[in-house]
Image: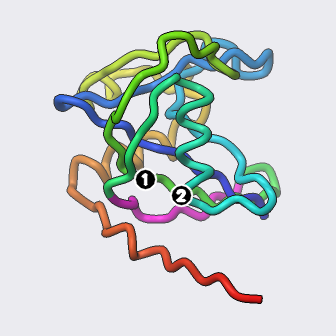
């Protein structure tokens, strides 16, 4: 099972989405998202992925409901955070994305199914956001011990 982390970055009622650069998902829309690296915290992974793909430094404000996804006999756990922009690095070279765009939730819901990398989970995240299903950050405990 893979752990995937990402952010719904919100600013002035709009959400940041990215167009992917990979050959397999070329120009498909997605949120800033990626695999959690070994030894990395869930929060740090979401912040890192968001910066790598967008150039935005973000602050996490909450966590959306966690999704367990079964696709093509593979399982994923999706952990998304609601985040806000703290700063932007204009010199940052995008990693894995072609462009970044701000859209309203309504505009995101109007994107065609085939234009998303993963349509159903992307739509579910916007539904959670619109319904206010945002939990405090301490919903995810941080247990560190030796």
- In screen coordinates, is 24 left or right of 40? right
Specify few, some or many for label 1: CA neighbours under 10 Å numbering under 14, 14-19, or 20 or more. many
Q: Is residue 68 magenta?
A: yes
Specify few, some or many for label 2: CA neighbours under 10 Å numbering under 14, 14-19, or 20 or more. many
Q: Quadrant of residue 28?
A: top right
In this rendering, the answer to whether 140 lies above or below 83 is below
Q: Quadrant of residue 33?
A: top right
Which residue is nearer to you in this view: 139 or 28? 139
Chief secondary structure of the magenta portion: strand
Residue at 65% across, 52% down: 4
In terms of secondary structure, where does tag 2 sit? helix
Mark 2, residue position: 43
In this rendering, the answer to whether 38 lies above or below 98 is below
Q: Nearer the viewer, mark 2 or mark 1?
A: 2
Location of the N terminus (image quadrant): bottom right
Q: Which mark is residue 81?
A: 1
Which residue is nearer to you in this view: 39 or 74? 39
> Could you tell me if the residues under marks 2 and 1 are in contact, i.e. CB atoms within 8 Å?
yes
- Magenta part of the chain: 62-70
Q: Position of residue 131 (x, y in %)?
A: 21, 55
Q: Earlier in the sequence, mark 2 or mark 1?
A: 2
Location of the C terminus (image quadrant): bottom right
In this rendering, the answer to whether 42 lies above or below 97 is below
């Amino acid at each position: 099972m893979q752990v995937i982390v990402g952010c719904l970055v919100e600013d002035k009622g709009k959400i940041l989405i990215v167009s992917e650069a990979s050959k397999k998902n070329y120009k498909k829309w997605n949120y800033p998202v990626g695999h959690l690296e070994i030894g990395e915290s869930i929060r740090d992974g979401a912040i890192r992925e968001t910066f790598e793909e967008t150039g935005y430094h973000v602050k996490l404000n909450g966590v959306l409901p966690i999704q367990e996804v079964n696709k093509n006999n593979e399982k994923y756990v999706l952990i998304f955070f609601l985040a806000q922009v703290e700063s932007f690095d204009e010199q940052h070279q995008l990693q894995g994305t072609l462009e970044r765009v701000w859209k309203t939730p309504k505009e995101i819901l109007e994107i065609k199914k085939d234009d998303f990398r993963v349509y159903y989970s992307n739509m579910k995240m916007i539904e959670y956001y619109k319904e206010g299903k945002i939990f405090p950050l301490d919903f995810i405990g941080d247990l560190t011990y030796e």
